[in-house]
Image (cartoon, grey):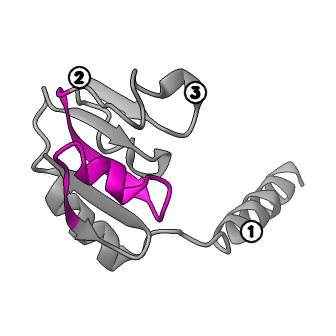
Amino acid sequence: WTALVLALATWWVQERFGRVPYPISESEAAALWTWIDRVEAEDGVLAHYDVTAPLSSRRLLYSYVMDANKPAGYPDRLDESIRWVFSKGGDVRPDLLAGQGFVEVHGGPVIRVWRR
C-alpha cells in the first residue's frame, strides 16, 4: 500500500513539474552555450540567475538581481574585470553597457549577451 501511495505521489509531482514553462527555449539555450563556452575562468561576469548555473565555475560571477550579489559600481561603472553581461530582457540598460565598452553579441528573445 505504501509503495502505491509513493508511486502515485511521485507521478503527481512529476506531472505538475512537467507543466512548468521553461523561460529559455532549447534553441536559445543552444545559442547561449556557444557564448558561455567562450567565457574564460578568470573573466568577470554579470548575469541573470537564469544563466548563473552554467557560469558558476567563473572566478568573478555577479548577479544584478539581488543587492548582495551586485558588483560595486553597478550599473553605471562596472569594474574592468567584468567582461561579460548576460541580461534578461530589458533588465540592464543598453546605453549604460555601451558607454562602458560593451557590445551586444547575442540578442535572444529572453537573454541578451554583452562582451567587452
Return the disc, 1 or 2, that comes first in the chain's sequence.
Answer: 1
Instruction: Find the distance from the CA under tag 3 to the CA under tag 2.
Output: 19 Å
- Give the residue type at disc 2: Arg
The residue wearing badge 2 is: 59
Q: Residue at x 66, y 69 (%)?
A: 20
Point out the stretch of residues depicted in magenta.
80-105
Q: Residue at x 52, y 68 (%)?
A: 23
The residue wearing badge 1 is: 16
Q: Secondary structure at mark 3?
A: helix
Which label sits in the foreground, 3 or 2?
Answer: 3
Q: Secondary structure at mark 2?
A: loop
Question: Answer yes or no: do the residues labelled 1 and 3 have beta carbons within 8 Å?
Answer: no
The residue wearing badge 3 is: 67
Could you say where residue 1 lies in the image, as x and y percent from the top left? 90, 55
Which label sits in the foreground, 1 or 3?
Answer: 3
Which label sits in the foreground, 1 or 2?
Answer: 2
Could you say where residue 102 lies in the image, as x and y percent from the top left? 19, 50
> Is 96 situated above or below 82?
below
Instruction: Find the distance from the CA under tag 1 to the CA under tag 2.
Output: 36 Å
